Amino acid sequence: MRRYELTDEQWALIEPHVPPAAPIGRRRVPPRTVWNGIFWVLRSGAPWRDLPERYGPWQSVYHHFNAWRREGVYDRVLAAMQVRLDAEGHIDWDLWCVDGTMVRASRSAAGAGKKGAATNPLTTHWAARAADSGASSTWSLTVTDFPSRSTSQRGRSTSAHSSKKS
């Protein structure tokens, strides 16, 4: 048994929920091998293109992953596992946690300034919504004067960032 692959007992739970392959004349990758390939990618975090050849072409495994998601195969497998685990007394329905992982980010990663850093009063934060989606983005707009050609040719600058030494 290789790492991330299903045992016979695990496959016996999943197999009844996998839709049968349509007979189209091409040699098909067995469904259990496809599931093992999907688990390999999800557990390893590798890109689909790095899927080992023993699981079949990565395009086929990726196609099945998406098709089974659309068809609700994963939801049916999860429901079947929950029914079995509940019947065996392994699920406490009063305590249901999806993930308890926490990652602490620095204040500056969340948009706050660094310690002792002066804030720029010329910076304005804008919240915008893209026309094709419901997601919003935050943009920063900084007002700055730039020298025009006529003033820079005479040796003078109106830039807010330039300074003269006395």
Image: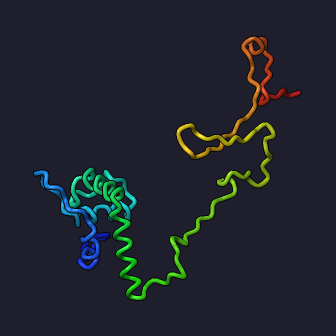
Q: Is residue 58 left or right of residue 86?
A: left
49 or 125: nearer the eye? 125
Image: 139 above or below 98:
above
| Image quadrant containing the C terminus | top right
Where residue 148 sits in the image (x, y, percent)?
74, 16
Q: Is residue 155 left or right of residue 30?
A: right
Q: In this view, which residue lies farthest toward the bottom? A: 89
Q: In this view, which residue lies farthest toward the right? A: 166
How many marks overall?
0
- Residue at 23% x, 67% y: name it: 32
- Residue at 68% x, 53% y: name it: 108
27 or 129: nearer the eye? 129
Where residue 48 sits in the image (x, y, percent)?
33, 53
5 or 118: nearer the eye? 5
Q: Is residue 139 left or right of residue 25?
A: right
Q: Is residue 22 left or right of residue 44?
A: left
- Residue at 77% x, 30% y: name it: 161
Where residue 125 sits in the image (x, y, percent)?
72, 42
Where residue 158 sits in the image (x, y, percent)?
80, 22
| Image quadrant containing the N terminus | bottom left
- Residue at 54% x, 43% y: name it: 133
Q: How is the image coloured?
A: rainbow
Image: 32 above or below 148:
below
Location of residue 54 (image quadrant):
bottom left
